[in-house]
Amino acid sequence: MPKKILVESAIHQLAAAGLRRLTALDASGKDSTALRCFLRSLQFEPSGSKFLHVHWSIPSTGSCELDFTDAKFYQRGDTALVAEKQREAGLSFAADSIAQQNQECFDRQLDALLAAAGIALPL
């Protein structure tokens, strides 16, 4: 059975958003236990090509559907030729606007997920 690479990428991006949130909570000295437990309870199910149905069991059982149509996924990795062209064009050290947009997209998706689960994090 072929992998659903977009779904796997979306799950990875959502996990990265959770890790960013955990890191920020830990750095501020705030309790991250509730978020950590919630994230561990997540289960994912593809729901179309750009949607994920997410289930959780903590703090209570629930689910919601996340729409990641705003995300932009890379079609393939950089080859040596592409990397060389980027260096020649002076793009090697430029900010990756797609990565930044995806971060913002999945941070919003994480917020929607937390809201659906009724989890309010300390500010």
Image (cartoon, rainbow, N blue to C red):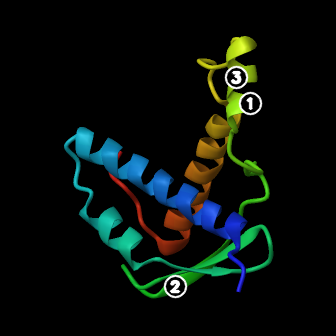
Instruction: Look at the numbered disc 3 and give the secondary structure of its residue.
Output: helix
Crowd around label 3: few <14 · some 14–19 · many ≥20 (10 Å): some
Tell me the kind of residue under disc 2: Gly
* Residue 33 drawn at (x, y percent): 24, 64
Instruction: Point out the residue furthest to the left here.
Output: 29
Instruction: Look at the numbered disc 1 and give the secondary structure of its residue.
Output: helix
* Residue 111 drawn at (x, y percent): 54, 56
Q: Which mark is residue 5?
A: none
Q: Which mark is residue 84?
A: 3
Nearest to the observer: residue 102 or residue 88: 88
Q: Is residue 96 above or below residue 78?
A: above
At x 23%, y 48%, the residue is 30
Q: Is residue 4 above or below residue 112?
A: below
For disc 2, the marked residue is 62
* Residue 40 drawn at (x, y percent): 36, 73
Task: Estimate the spatial distance between the alpha carbons at disc 2 and disc 3, rounded to whole Å.
Answer: 48 Å
Contact between labelled residues 3 and 1, with CB atoms less than 8 Å apart: yes
Label located before the other in sequence (2 or 3): 2
For disc 1, the marked residue is 81
Crowd around label 1: few <14 · some 14–19 · many ≥20 (10 Å): few
At x 35%, y 45%, the residue is 123
Nearest to the observer: residue 21 or residue 50: 50
Task: Estimate the spatial distance between the alpha carbons at disc 1 and disc 2, rounded to whole Å.
Answer: 47 Å
Image quadrant assignment for residue 18: bottom left
Q: Is residue 111 left or right of residue 38?
A: right
Q: Nearer the viewer, mark 1 or mark 2?
A: 1
Crowd around label 2: few <14 · some 14–19 · many ≥20 (10 Å): some
Tell me the kind of residue under disc 1: Leu
* Residue 50 drawn at (x, y percent): 77, 67
At x 46%, y 70%, the residue is 118
Q: Is residue 111 left or right of residue 87?
A: left
